[in-house]
Amino acid sequence: MSDRRKKGPLSSLWETLLHPDYDDEEMRERQVVIEAANQLQVGEFQLLQLAYREWYGKDLPEAQVAKLFTDYMLRSDVPHWARHYARNIVHGCETGTIDENEPRYHRYDHEYGKPVRHGVRRFWIAVFWLVLFVGGGILAAELVTDNPASIFPPYLETDELPKQKP
């Protein structure tokens, strides 16, 4: 753990103001996790869950989720097993040995790989109703006004507009 995390928030603010690169040094460990998560197209915390499963052979226990989340997101504390896993993912993606669409990398994505049923049909039904609604509104406005000032809302007639004095 860095010296900054042992100090209070005001001293860490003071440290950042005196040494602006201090945050960059601390984020270097976390940057590997961010890059690996981007390569796999998953969230950072999902990558931590995958790393835990790879290292320990079981899912992350519920009791440790809050602590891991707090340590990682608020303190930028990256566990050694997550750093190792992230480096392997980045190296594998760079060498082409990892397929980011492989289902094992998306085991925590509940919607991943599920096809949308009747997706094209639903799209055309939505388009139909949208055209009917918008077109019907324009048609109704055109029928209601006798001498429109414009075709756009508000549908004012030229009689309702103030007369300009010559």
Image: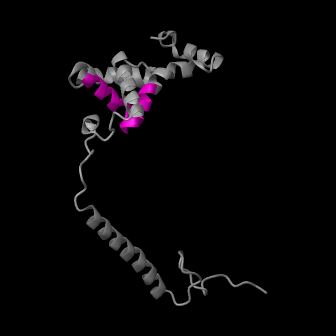
Whether the magenta-drawn stretch holds residue 40 is answered as yes
Q: Nearer the viewer, residue 19 or 143?
A: 19
Residue at the limit of the structure toward the right, as seen here: 166
x 37%, y 39%: residue:
41
Color theme of the render: one colour
**Foreground: 165 or 103?**
103
Q: Position of residue 122 (x, y in %)?
A: 28, 65
Overall secondary structure of the magenta section: helix
Is 80 left, or right, of 115 in this rendering?
right
Residue range (magenta): 32-54
Q: Position of residue 127 (x, y in %)?
A: 35, 70
Quadrant in the rendering for residue 99: top left
Considering depth in this image, is 27 or 41 the residue closer to the camera?
41
Give above or below for 144 relative to 22. below
Q: Position of residue 84 (x, y in %)?
A: 36, 20
Q: Residue at x 23, y 62 (%)?
A: 118
Q: Is residue 131 above or below residue 114?
A: below
Left or right of 97, for residue 115: left
Q: Residue at x 40, y 36 (%)?
A: 39
Residue 165 in the magenta stretch? The answer is no
Quadrant of res 105: top left
**Quadrant of residue 86 within the rendered picture:** top left
- Quadrant placement of the N terminus: top left
